[in-house]
Amino acid sequence: MEKSEKITILLRQEINGRKYETGSRFPSETELADRFGVNQKTINKAVSQLVAEGLLQRGVRGSGTHVKACSSFPRMRIAYIGKFYHPYYANILNGIQLAALEQDCVVDVLYPLAEQFSSFVSKIRNSDIKGIISSAYGTIDGGSLPVIYLDEESAGDYYKDFVACNSYQGGYEMMRALISKGHRNIVLLTYITDTRQRVAGFQDAMREAGIDRISDRLYTSIQCSDYDTETLFKKMNADFPGFTAIASTGDDCIFRVISFLEKKNIPWRGKIAMTGFGNISGISNLLPIATVDQHPFHIGKKAFSELMRKIENPDRAVRERIDVELLGLENIPVLAGRPPHTVKGRLHPKAIVSKVI
């Protein structure tokens, strides 16, 4: 958050908290600059925002700035259109709504059925909602309303303005972690949903390490069923006997594999490395797997912040990627008789180095 935004929030709270009487003189920009230890340009930006909100009124001919009114709550309403029942989306929504409350805004949460979607978007356009944050609904015709998208796999391809995690980075670095511990006979598991950036990260790291038959190592789950999981596992074993690692594009995917193995009493702990994606509570914290934390809470907070800027400046382009974090790497077995392998070469340019725990 920029300094001017922090100052705006504090001054707004002071005005709404009746620190300054309505009609009274507001501290000058020089006084505020001294108080906060910033330049007058930063203060001017904060004061201008409060003027735009109707809290302050600039005088004429150097008569100063005066308190115009205390705002009613909420100051602004925005809409979140998307899933919220999955832990990942719940964390995103939590970040959005907490950031909104800090600025006296509220979030309307909508998850319409497909046949209701167009009707609800039309209603939003004709309401007092000032902007939209959307996830998993595709492109939205918001009219004059700014829309921030959170679908990281399609970010930059279909969406003009987005805040998303760096999925490519997560896939690339997780694969490097597997290879560094001696794994080379690795299979990839994904779901039918759009996960191509994660898969691309996996495959680029495998290609750099000289692993063969990369495209053949990718298996796509069509259904969330025991039968589908068992069928895929048997095919993996037939195609790549003795594989030592399954790199998955989701914690949910790897959980289904582990559930199948446990039901069949097939030993895997300490034998097959299992990696997921998402750091989903109830999976990654209970099972010995490695995973990628996408930091959904911070994605939500950042999305709200960028939406506020977009509302103030509609021409502003929003293209923000949040770094991911690898967790549980100690759960990746080091292959017996094979020392950890040092991955040679530089990181792929798409993969920004993340913190590793």
Image (cartoon, rainbow, N blue to C red):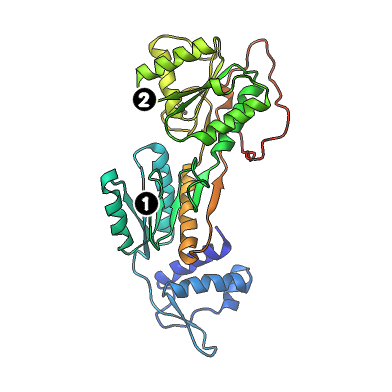
- Category of crowding for the residue at label 2, using alpha-carbon neighbours closer than 10 angstroms: few (below 14), some (14–19), many (at least 20): few
In the rendered image, residue 31, in percent from the top left (x then y), is placed at 58, 77
Query: As drawn, is 73 to the left or to the right of 305?
Result: left
The secondary element bearing badge 2 is classed as loop
The C terminus lies in which quarter of the figure?
top right
Placement of 316 over or under 137, stated as above or below:
below
The residue tagged 2 is 223
Q: Quadrant of residue 183?
A: top right
In the rendered image, residue 267, in percent from the top left (x then y), is placed at 48, 10
Q: Check residue 57 in the rendering and tell me which mark sits there, or answer none.
A: none
Give the amino acid at mark 2.
Gln
Query: As drawn, is 197 to the left or to the right of 145?
Result: right
Q: Observer-nearest residue: 49 or 33?
A: 49
Q: How many marks?
A: 2
Q: Quadrant of residue 174?
A: top right
The residue tagged 1 is 80
Can residue 168 be seen from the camera position used here?
Answer: yes
Placement of 253 over or under 195, stated as above or below:
above
In the rendered image, residue 335, in percent from the top left (x then y), is placed at 63, 14
What is the C-alpha distance between the residues marked 1 and 2? 28 Å
Q: Quadrant of residue 168?
A: top right
Placement of 138 over or under 106, stated as above or below:
above
Can residue 113 be seen from the camera position used here?
Answer: no
